[in-house]
Image: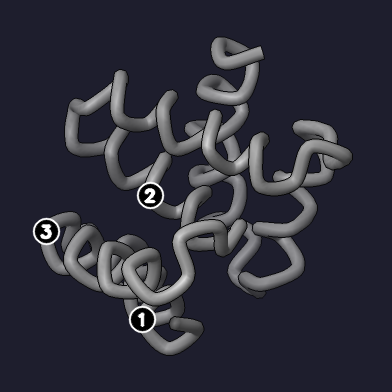
Amino acid sequence: FYTHSFTATIHLLNGELEAAQTDVDRSLAIHPTFLFGLLLSAVIAEKRGGHAAGLAAVRRARESEPAMSGEDYLAAVESVLANRDAVSELNATLRGLLEEAA
């Protein structure tokens, strides 16, 4: 499931949203509560215009890791990705979803 999530990340960073969704779906099929996969799913959904699906993915992430704060989720994304510009963009999208889902 890690491979699919990281491949999804590469597709997302390249703007290949359909391919990113396909790979994150594969990851979550193997491990439905994988935090990074759920967060990727939220960002991909939001970028594809699926706001409700993005919120649902954030809520599933919160259910899977209830002790983590929104800032912890953003830090998790930062710890995986080295490209700070890409992280900033992804986390801006994710921050909006986290705030609304709270």
**Residue depicted at 71% across the width and 45% down the height:** 74
**Residue that numbered label 3 is attached to:** 18
Left-right relation of 84 to 90: right
**Residue that numbered label 1 is attached to:** 4
Mark earlier in primary sequence (2, 1): 1
**On the image, which quarter does residue 11 sit in?**
bottom left
Q: Estimate the spatial distance between the alpha carbons at disc 2 and disc 1, rounded to whole Å.
A: 12 Å
Amino acid of disc 3: Glu
Residue lying farthest left?
18
Left-right relation of 85 to 27: right
**Residue depicted at 22% across the width and 27% down the height:** 50
Left-right relation of 70 to 27: right
- Under tag 1, what secondary structure? helix
Comparing 65 with 92, the one in front is 65
Q: Is residue 11 above or below residue 46?
A: below
Give neighbour class at mark 2: few <14, some 14-19, many 20+ (Cα, 10 Å). many
**On the image, which quarter does residue 8 sit in?**
bottom left
Amino acid of disc 1: His
Say if mark 2 contacts mark 1, CB within 8 Å.
no
Which of discs 1 and 3 lies nearer the camera? The answer is 1
Percent across and percent down for residue 69 are 83, 33
Percent across and percent down for residue 59 are 54, 29
Amino acid of disc 2: Ser
- Under tag 3, what secondary structure? helix
State the mark number for residue 41. Answer: 2
Mark earlier in primary sequence (3, 2): 3
